[in-house]
Amino acid sequence: MSAETLRAGRRVYLDHAATTPVDARVLAAMLPYFSEKFGNPNSPHAFGREAVAAVDDARDTVAACIGAKANEVYFTSGGTEADNWALAGIMRANAERGRHFIVSAVEHHAVLEAARALCKEGFSCYVAPVDGAGAVDVAALKGLLRPDTVLVCLMAANNEVGTVQPLAEVSALCRERGILLFSDAVQAAGTLPVNVNSPHVDLLSLSSHKLYGPKGAGALYVRSGVKIAPLLFGGRQERGRRGGTVNVPACVGFAGALRLCAAEREREHARLFALRERFARQVLAGTDALRNGDAKHSLPGVVSFTFDGTDGEAVLYALDLAGVAASGGAACSSGAPEPSHVLLAMGRSEAQARASVRFSFGRENTEEDADFAAETVIQTIQKLRARRAEE
Ligand code: PLP
C-alpha cells in the first residue's frame, strides 16, 4: 500500500487547547443527571436534594483538586464567565480601595475585553509587557503598580504559545502590597499542578472543556474574605453570589474530569511533553520554522511555530485538508482578521503573527499521530512555498 493510501482518511486532532473530547468515564458519570436525577438543586424535595448532593460533591472535588475550601468555589458557565466575573466583580466591589488594575499583555480575550469594558466604566488599566518567550516582565509589572492598584491579572499558562507565567514572583509582589491577584488557570489546570496556596492567589478561573469535561462549565475560585460583586443577578444560587440554576450534569462532569486530570497528571505530562518534542524536532528539522514561546516552561502539549512568508490561514486550511487539525493562535479569534495579540506582544511582526500555527496534543494522541502530523506539516509548507515561488 502506498504512503498516500495509508494517509487517506486519516485525521489527527492537534487542537486540544481549543477544546477536548469528553472522557468516556466523565460522560458516564454525567448521564444520570440529564434524566432520572434531573432535580433542581434549589428544590426542597427529594429530587432537589439528590441534585444538591451531586453539586456539593462536585464542589468538594474541585476544591480538593486546587487546594481550596468548598465554599470558595463558585460554578460558572465556563472560563469566559469566570474571567469576566473576576475582573468586574473585584473592581466594582472594591472601588473604595482604588480604581486601578493591571493585566498582562498575553491574557485571553475573556480578560482583555472585560478590562476594556471596565475602562469604559471609569476604571483604569495598565498592560504589563512580556518578554520574547511570552512570560510577563516582572520588573516592568512592579513598576506599574500604584497605591490605588486593586488587582493584578496574570494567567497561569498562555493558551497560544503555552508559556508558563512567573506567578510565584508576581504573587509575592502582590502580597507585599495587599493587592489582589487573579490567575486564569483555564489552560494550566488540565496538565500542570494548580494550587491556590502555592503560589498564593486570591481568584482563579477554570474551564471544564479544556480538560476532557463538557463545554459550558467552569468555576471561579474566590478566597474567603475577598469582596466580589455578582456578575449575574437572579436567585440566591451559589451562596447568593451568582444567580441562575446550576447546571448539575455539567458540574458533575467538570469535577470528574478535573479529578481524572489530577490523578493522571504526572504520567500524562511526561507523555505529552515527549510527544510534543518528537513532533517539534521533526518540524524544526524539516522546515525553517521559528518556535514561539518557552520550550521548557510551558504547557506540555502545546507548541507554536511561525512559518515565515506563509499565510497562517492558508497553512491551516491545507493542513486540515491533509488531515491535521491545528489552530492559528487562539481558536476563539480564528476567522478574525487581526493577528494574534500574544505573538505581537512577544515581538513578532504582524506578518509573522499571521504566519503562525499552534499545535496542541492531548490524551488520545500517539507517537504515530506526532510523526504523521510532522510529515504533513513539512510537506504542506514545502507545497505552499513552491506554489508561492511559481506565482
Ligand atoms: N482563558 C483561557 C486562557 C482560554 O484559553 C480560554 C478558552 O480558550 C478561556 C479563558 C475561555 O474559556 P471558555 O471557553 O470556557 O469560556
Image (cartoon, rainbow, N blue to C red):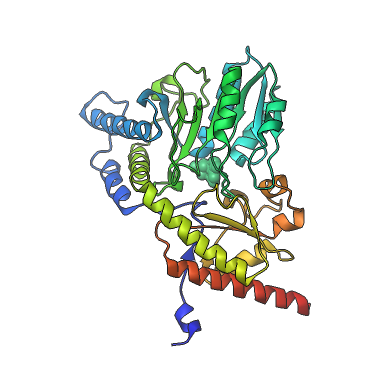
* Nearer to me, 385 or 32: 385
Q: Quadrant of the N terminus?
A: bottom left
The vertical placement of 116 against 4, above or below, is above
**Placement of 235 over or under 364, stated as above or below:** above
Q: Quadrant of residue 243?
A: top left
For this orientation, the residue located farthest to the bottom is: 1
Check the image and report above or below for 377 versus 91.
Answer: below
Query: Can residue 221 be spotted in the picture?
Result: yes
Camera-nearest residue between 291 and 333? 291
Which residue does the image show at 61% across and 72% down from the upper left? 286
Q: Position of residue 135 (x, y in %)?
A: 63, 42
Image location (x, y in percent) of residue 240 = 42, 20
> Taking 225 as reference, is 186 above or below it?
below
Q: x, y (%) of residue 119?
A: 70, 27
Q: Can residue 120 be seen?
A: no
Q: In the picture, residue 57 is in which quadrant?
A: top left
Residue lying furthest top: 96
In the depicted view, which residue is nearer to us: 199 or 244?
A: 199
